[in-house]
Image: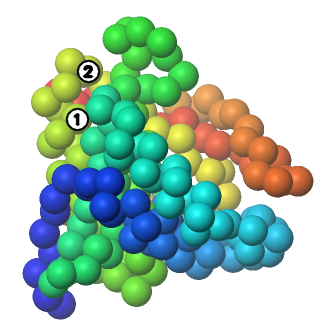
């Protein structure tokens, strides 16, 4: 497999990150979320969302995994979204790879890069939310030292309500 490198994301990456996000969702969540939810995902909306993150949110770091010259995945970190003050934790907000490179160790390497960056923030602990039904990602996070806290919440996706589960781990 050609070498994988990591670099910070820039606003010019918005469209390719939207493409990776949609591609990854449509494979990871096929049969778990409704076909309607997955088919309604829009390049235009996702590109605009990534553009806002990359252009307007300096507290958020986006890291891109690159193979050759092409982006194959990305991960995002920032302060915990639900908490207004620095009293919160660092949040691993997203980690998505193109399905063609799943289970080849790239997720682990991107995760370690993100963890290294999180350890440089003022936070001692990190948290993330993962869909309850996302067994692949839950196994991944559990293999990489994250533990479920028992806390759950719900997210509305179109007509569906999906349970999300909180995980935490130490950064020290
Ligand atoms: C979750 C994801 C990032 C993992 O990346 P990856 O490159 O496939 O994972 P790795 O190959 O680095 O795996 C690291 C370890 O995680 C665990 N793991 C990964 N995939 C797994 C699976 N399908 N089943 C069980 N354990 C798994 C294993 O312990 C693995 O180590 P091993 O291969 O030595 O056994 C990737 O599958 C993905 O992009 N999924 C879709 C997006 C998603 O769900 N993201 C999380 C949103 S919160």
**Residue 80 in picture, x, y percent from top left:** 43, 26
Q: Which residue is mark 1?
A: 118
Q: Is mark 2 within 8 Å of ligand 1?
A: no
Q: Quadrant of ligand 1?
A: bottom left
- Residue for point 17% across, 32% down: 119
Residue 149 or residue 14, whichever sits in front: 14
**Residue 96 in picture, x, y percent from top left:** 42, 63
Q: Name, please, the residue furthest toward the right.
A: 159
Q: Is residue 132 visible?
A: yes
**Residue 14 in picture, x, y percent from top left:** 40, 60
Q: Name, please, the residue furthest toward the bottom.
A: 1
Which quadrant holds the C terminus?
top left
Residue 167 or residue 55, whichever sits in front: 55
Horizontal side of 46 relative to 90 (left or right) equals: right
Q: Are marks 2 and 1 in contact (CB under 8 Å)?
A: yes
Q: Residues within 10 Å of mark 1 (few under 14, many from 20)?
A: many
- Residue for point 17% across, 90% down: 1
Judging from the image, what secondary structure is the residue with disc 1 in? helix
Q: Which residue is mark 2?
A: 123
- Residue for point 29% across, 74% down: 71
């Amino acid at each position: 497999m050609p070498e994988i490198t990591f670099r910070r994301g820039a606003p010019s990456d918005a469209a390719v990150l939207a493409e990776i996000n949609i591609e990854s969702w449509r494979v990871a969540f096929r049969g778990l979320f409704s076909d309607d939810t997955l088919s309604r995902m829009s390049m235009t909306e996702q590109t605009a969302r990534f553009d806002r993150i990359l252009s307007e949110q300096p507290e958020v770091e986006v890291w891109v995994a690159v193979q050759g010259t092409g982006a194959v995945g990305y991960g995002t970190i920032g302060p915990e979204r639900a908490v207004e003050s620095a009293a919160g934790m660092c949040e691993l907000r997203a980690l998505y790879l193109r399905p063609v490179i799943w289970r080849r160790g790239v997720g682990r390497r991107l995760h370690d890069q993100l963890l290294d960056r999180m350890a440089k923030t003022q936070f001692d602990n990190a948290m993330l939310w993962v869909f309850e039904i996302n067994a692949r990602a839950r196994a991944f996070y559990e293999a990489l030292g994250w533990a479920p806290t028992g806390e759950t919440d719900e997210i509305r996706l179109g007509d569906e309500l999906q349970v999300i589960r909180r995980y935490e781990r130490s950064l020290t």
